[in-house]
Amino acid sequence: MQNLDTKKSPQTTKCKRAKSPIAHLLNRKNKLDGLKLLQKLDEKSIRVVFFDPQYRGVLDKLSYGNEGKSRGVERSALPQMSEELIENFILEIHRVLMPNGYLFLWVDKFHLVEGVKKWFERFKDFGIVDMITWDKKRIGMGYRTRRRSEHLIIVQKYPKQAKKTWVLHNIPDVWEEKLASKSHTHSKPLELQKQLLLATTSEGDLVLDPASGGYSVLKVCKEINRNFIGCDLVFGEDDE
């Protein structure tokens, strides 16, 4: 696992006081529909969004008649997102992101092959600027090649700017990190997410994860003093 030196975060500000409509949802695990949560947020109020869509198309491509029976049971049981639903999420994410803000979009190799650009075609001020491949350092499932990686597409809301919005310059585009434990079927690398937040946010900034799963982003936000707002349809200790 890579553990990088940290620098002062960009655009340092004092901790922001949350507005009352969402104050009760901050820094906790909310069992809630992600679109409903997004609709509660003000326009241009979020510095960074992490989004890991549970995409039905991937399961369809991997289905060999035993999906959810002898393999992929946990993954198959999760509610799946259609293309239309993902596009609706991205529409709302675009609305709540600040100018220069970042969307970190988790995808697998099938998304890369099929392309995700169509999800952003309606926007003239929202573009892909980079990508990181996460090497999990363990072999997963697969009927031909076996999966060992996921991919993080980095999307920025215009105006595009790197110098003042990304202050760490030692994050490699292939990131090796083995999960210490797997609390969720789609668990994500804590250290990578931590470094990305240190690179793009300041203390007190609001970080959004509208499909939180195992709430790894919440854990990182608590560690580095960012405000978290997020939810999951299935996982969460509290209903709204």
Image (cartoon, helix red, strand yellow):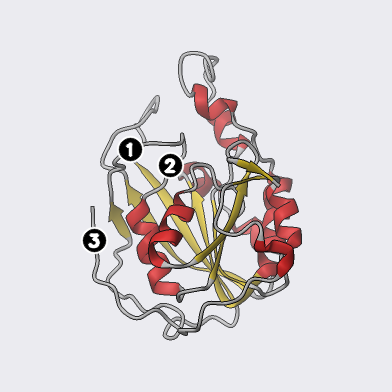
Identify which amino acid the numbered label 1 is placed on.
Ser
User: Which residue bears the numbered disc 3?
Assistant: 3
State the residue position of label 2. 187
Label 3: few (<14), some (14–19) or many (≥20) C-alpha neighbours in 10 Å = few
Residue 211: assigned label: none
Give the percent coordinates (x, y) of residue 130.
Answer: 44, 66
Please, is residue 144 above or below residue 42 in the view? above
Give the residue drawn at x 42%, y 85%.
Answer: 163
Which mark sits nearer the N-terminus, 2 or 3? 3
Asked if the residues shown at circle 2 and circle 3 are in contact, with their CB atoms under 8 angstroms apart, the answer is: no
Structural distance between the alpha carbons of marks 1 and 3: 17 Å
Alpha carbon separation for disc pair 2 and 3: 18 Å
The image quarter in which residue 81 lies: top right
Q: Nearer the viewer, residue 20 or 89?
A: 20
Name the kind of residue labelled 3 in the image.
Answer: Asn
Mark 1 or mark 2: which is in front? 1
Q: Are marks 1 and 2 in contact (CB under 8 Å)?
A: yes
Q: Position of residue 153 (x, y in %)?
A: 48, 59
Residue at which label 1 appears: 181
Give neighbour class at mark 2: few <14, some 14-19, many 20+ (Cα, 10 Å): some
Secondary element at tag 3 = loop
- 1 or 3: tag closer to the N-terminus: 3
The 10 Å Cα crowd at callout 1, few under 14, some 14 to 19, many 20 or more, is few
SS for tag 2? loop
Q: Which three-letter amino acid code belongs to the residue tagged 2?
A: Ser
